Amino acid sequence: MRAGLLILLVAGAAAYQEKKDELSPCLSECIQPLAKMERSFAFIFNNFEKVCDSLERGAHCVMKCGGEDAQKFHQLTSFYRLYCIDYEEDLEPHVSCLARASQGSDKECKRRCAMKVEKQHEKEKKLKHACSSIECSTVCYYQLLSEECPNAQDVLLNVNLRQISEMASTLDPKVHGDLGDECRHIHDREYMRKKLLDRR
């Protein structure tokens, strides 16, 4: 497995879907292969090389687009970067176990964490539900994958905490003050650390 790639799968790909009209044609072209991939841990771990190769190609592609597009690409693909670059060496010995475990985890975490949001719900309520779902999913995946692959527990914790820190670092402090508790929680590293490690 080659050294290096890019962090955000679920959040990043979702952000792409929501903001694709705001992206330059150059950035859209570079990020499209990643955005089209199935957004599940089972897909990532069962196609780890393919996913990481796609990220690497996208990173090379965006170099022709300019600084602002490169920065957006970095943010939108942050989930992949964590798995494929920052923690690739630490994850590599556990990929086969995680590939097996993620099949059941995907089903169980979707069952536990899916929140039904009606179309008529106001934006604030939809955001609250989305943040609660992200917290639930983050904790669910970490705990289930750690149970099935205990030797991967430390690296999975580090990946999750880094992702939380990166999400928090990109949040405007003014916006943070306006967030409800559900959304503040998923940007709070210590709060999330306690939730991840709480086995009750």
Image (tube, rainbow, N blue to C red):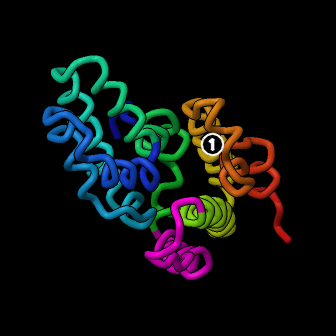
The x, y position of residue 177, in whole percent, is: 71, 38
Left-right relation of 67 to 200: left
Of residues 82 and 110, the one nearer the viewer is: 110
Q: Going 52% across and 72% down the picture, which residue do you hit?
A: 121
User: Residue, x 35% and y 31% (percent of image)?
Assistant: 72
The residue at the point 46 percent across, 61 percent down is 96
- What residue appears at the point 62 percent right and 47 percent down from the top-left corner? 160
Position of residue 88 relative to residue 36, above or below, is above
Would you say the magenta stretch is mainly helix, strand or loop? helix
Quadrant of the rendering where the N terminus is positioned: top left
Residue at the outermost right position? 200
On whether residue 112 falls in the magenta region, the answer is: yes
**Residue highlighted by disc 1:** 164
- Residue count near mark 1 (Cα–Cα under 10 Å), binned few <14, some 14–19, many ≥20: many
Can residue 58 be seen in this snapshot? yes
Q: Considering the numbered disc 1 on the image, is that residue within a helix, a strand or a loop? A: helix
Magenta region, residue range: 100-124
Q: Does 45 sit above or below residue 42? A: above
Direction from residue 187 to residue 172 in the image, left or right:
left
Asked where in the image residue 178 lies, by quadrant, the reply is top right
Report the side of 182 relative to 167 (left or right).
Answer: right
Residue 133 image position (x, y, % from top left): 60, 66
**Residue 121 lies in magenta, yes or no?**
yes
- Quadrant containing the C terminus in the rendered view: bottom right
Quick check: 176 left or right of 15? right
Amino acid type indicated by mark 1: Ile
Residue 16: x, y in percent? 32, 48
